[in-house]
Image: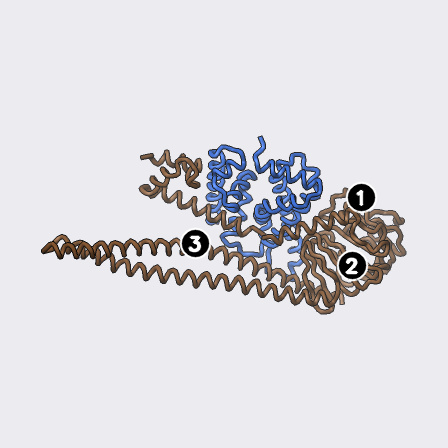
């Protein structure tokens, strides 16, 4: 059974396909942070991650008609973001190779990540469902009960999903700290 | 009371996350007496703060929606053919990166006619389709192309170019014969860069989808950037046009844009720096106040203890009453100070959590500014090469 958010996404997708840009604005608003975080987890450059997320949304809009299950918009978008980010990261590496003589001091990862940046990188390590609930809880400030109601899922499922994701991130953070 | 194993199982199930979860208070109660479980909870709550900070840091703001929607709107108008192309006189040229081509093997430029030899398709006749980003013509040739497949923009079916000798290493320069626009295509497929010069302007870019629109009289060319950033070179310098933006390629417009960009960048940095400084000052104020309250608390607490001790040895009823009044007064003062210290400590924690976020935003903005400056420098170097 599709969750409430997934139903809302599906309804927004249908409205987009009918030409309602407001519906697309809603989807951009809902997933922009997640898209930038996922892109950053791949390309590790903030400005580039924003560009990638923007490109992914435009690409998603262009190919909305090909989305066979509109309720899976989030997972579909995350896949587009990841692919676009991988391509962008690849282009950065190629560009850096070409410009090496002029800018030999710069590798593909030019920014020194702060704690928030490092965590944004780690967010790409958890699955799409977990990214979604983490966004609802920690960006939109919803309680577990509210998320459970919104997603039409048992509260136990939501809490264990968040707890598991936090455990994964905690371990990943520790591994990063040891490196 | 629950044992650690039971509590760990509940923690794994996420019952610690917020008070709406069943078993939340038991976990809290247990953690208040068990250092190991308290440590685990503290670590998980630290991870929570990091996730929150990361997601807030990742939020690109409302400008992001505007840029995405602008791009989508323009694309829709182009696809509907609603963008005024000044009838047949307008020239629209768009080149997508070879790496992004989705139109299959036949996507590319079709050479309609050529006065000189084709480099990759040497000896081929007009009608040959060559991929985007390839060396397609010899310098000095006059070539007409039409763009086929894989292009998301509405394009004029045929655009005629005159090819002049390479202006910089690795570039083949193509000058538009009609419409007053000059176009240079970077021929290195790996970089898939594109240069477009329009009436004395050079559009120097990396990995961007853009569209140049020029009127017949050529006096008001405009540039729309669909994806990525485009560096525009002109007599007054270079400026960056971000995706979703539509800019007239007019000297005055570009110059004012260049100044506005510089000013905005300085303002953004100064504002963020000021916010961080203000936050640090506020934190220092709260720390100083908390220290004062702590000193007063120690003093009042000591008075209270002394009064209590004295009460135990009060010689008469009257003295005992006075001491009890004093104890009550001191007790109330200590409680007030407890409250004030609690408030200040909470505020300090809030400020301490906020400060790294602001600093991260400041670093992010600095990095973006630095990237923009390096783009502008690279653009200037390319512009000098063109001249």
In the rendered view, tell whether residue B191 sits above or below residue B262: above
Check disc 3: other Cα within 10 Å, few if <14, some if 14-19, many if 20+: few
Q: Position of residue B235 (x, y in %)?
A: 74, 69
State the residue position of label 2.
B184
Q: Do the residues labelled 3 and 2 touch (CB within 8 Å)?
A: no
Q: Which chain is blue?
A: A
Q: Which chain carries label 1?
A: B
Q: Which chain is brown?
A: B
What is the CA distance from the residue labelled 1 to the residue labelled 3? 59 Å
Please check whether the numbered discs 3 and 2 fall on a single chain.
Answer: yes
Q: Where is residue B387 in the image (x, y as percent from the top left)?
A: 76, 67
Q: Position of residue B166 (x, y in %)?
A: 79, 61
The local secondary structure at tag 3 comes to helix
Mark closer to the chain start, 3 or 2: 2
Quarter of the figure that contains the N terminus of chain A: top right
Q: In the image, is B2 to the left or to the right of A107?
A: left
State the residue position of label 1.
B106
What is the CA distance from the residue labelled 3 to the residue labelled 2? 54 Å
State the residue position of label 3.
B350
| Residue at image location 80% in from the left, 48% down from the top | B81
Q: Do the residues labelled 1 and 2 touch (CB within 8 Å)?
A: no
Q: Which chain carries label 2?
A: B
| Residue at image location 61% in from the left, 51% down from the top | A49
């Amino acid at each position: 059974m599709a969750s409430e958010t997934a139903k809302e996404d599906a309804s927004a997708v249908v409205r987009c396909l009918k030409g309602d840009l407001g519906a697309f604005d809603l989807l951009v608003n809902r997933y922009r942070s997640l898209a930038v975080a996922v892109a950053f987890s791949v390309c590790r450059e903030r400005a580039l991650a924003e560009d990638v997320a923007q490109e992914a949304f435009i690409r998603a809009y262009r190919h909305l008609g090909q989305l066979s299950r509109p309720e899976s918009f989030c997972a579909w978008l995350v896949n587009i973001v990841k692919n676009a980010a991988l391509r962008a990261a690849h282009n950065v590496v190629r560009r850096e190779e070409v410009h090496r003589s002029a800018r030999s001091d710069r590798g593909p990862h030019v920014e020194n990540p702060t704690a928030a940046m490092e965590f944004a990188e780690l967010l790409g390590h958890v699955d799409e469902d977990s990214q979604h609930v983490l966004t609802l809880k920690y960006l939109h400030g919803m309680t577990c009960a509210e998320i459970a109601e919104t997603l039409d899922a048992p509260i136990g499922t939501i809490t264990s999903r968040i707890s598991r994701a936090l455990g994964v991130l905690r371990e990943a953070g520790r591994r990063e700290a040891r490196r | 009371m629950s044992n650690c194993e039971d509590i760990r199982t509940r923690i794994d199930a996420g019952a610690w996350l917020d008070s709406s979860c069943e078993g939340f208070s038991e976990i809290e109660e247990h953690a208040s007496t068990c250092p190991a479980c308290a440590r685990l909870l503290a670590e998980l709550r630290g991870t929570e703060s990091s996730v929150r900070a990361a997601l807030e840091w990742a939020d690109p703001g409302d400008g992001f929606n505007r840029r995405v929607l602008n791009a989508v709107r323009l694309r829709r108008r182009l696809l509907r053919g609603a963008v005024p192309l000044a009838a047949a006189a307008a020239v629209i040229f768009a080149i997508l990166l070879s790496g992004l081509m989705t139109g299959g093997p036949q996507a590319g430029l079709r050479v309609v006619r050529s006065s000189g030899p084709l480099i990759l398709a040497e000896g081929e006749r007009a009608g040959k389709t060559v991929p985007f980003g390839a060396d397609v013509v010899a310098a000095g040739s006059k070539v007409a192309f039409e763009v086929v497949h894989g292009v998301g923009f509405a394009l004029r079916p045929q655009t005629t170019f005159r090819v002049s000798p390479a202006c910089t290493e690795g570039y083949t320069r193509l000058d538009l014969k009609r419409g007053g626009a000059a176009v240079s295509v970077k021929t290195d497929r790996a970089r898939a860069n594109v240069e477009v010069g329009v009436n004395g302007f050079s559009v120097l870019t990396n990995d961007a989808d853009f569209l140049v629109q020029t009127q017949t009289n050529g006096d008001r060319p405009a540039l729309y950037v669909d994806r990525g950033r485009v560096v525009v070179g002109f007599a007054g310098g270079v400026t960056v046009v971000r995706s979703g933006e539509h800019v007239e390629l007019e000297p005055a417009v570009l110059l004012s844009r260049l100044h506005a960009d510089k000013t905005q960048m300085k303002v953004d940095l100064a504002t963020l720096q000021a916010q961080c400084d203000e936050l640090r000052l506020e934190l220092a104020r709260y720390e100083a106040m908390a220290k004062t309250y702590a000193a007063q608390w120690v003093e009042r607490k000591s008075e209270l203890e002394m009064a209590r001790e004295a009460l135990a040895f009060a010689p008469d009823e009257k003295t005992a009453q006075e001491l009890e009044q004093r104890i009550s007064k001191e007790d109330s003062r200590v409680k007030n100070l407890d409250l004030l210290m609690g408030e200040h400590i909470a505020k300090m924690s809030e400020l301490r959590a906020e400060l790294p976020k602001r600093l991260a935003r400041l670093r992010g903005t600095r990095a973006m500014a630095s990237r923009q400056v390096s783009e502008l420098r690279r653009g200037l170097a390319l512009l000098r090469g063109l001249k």
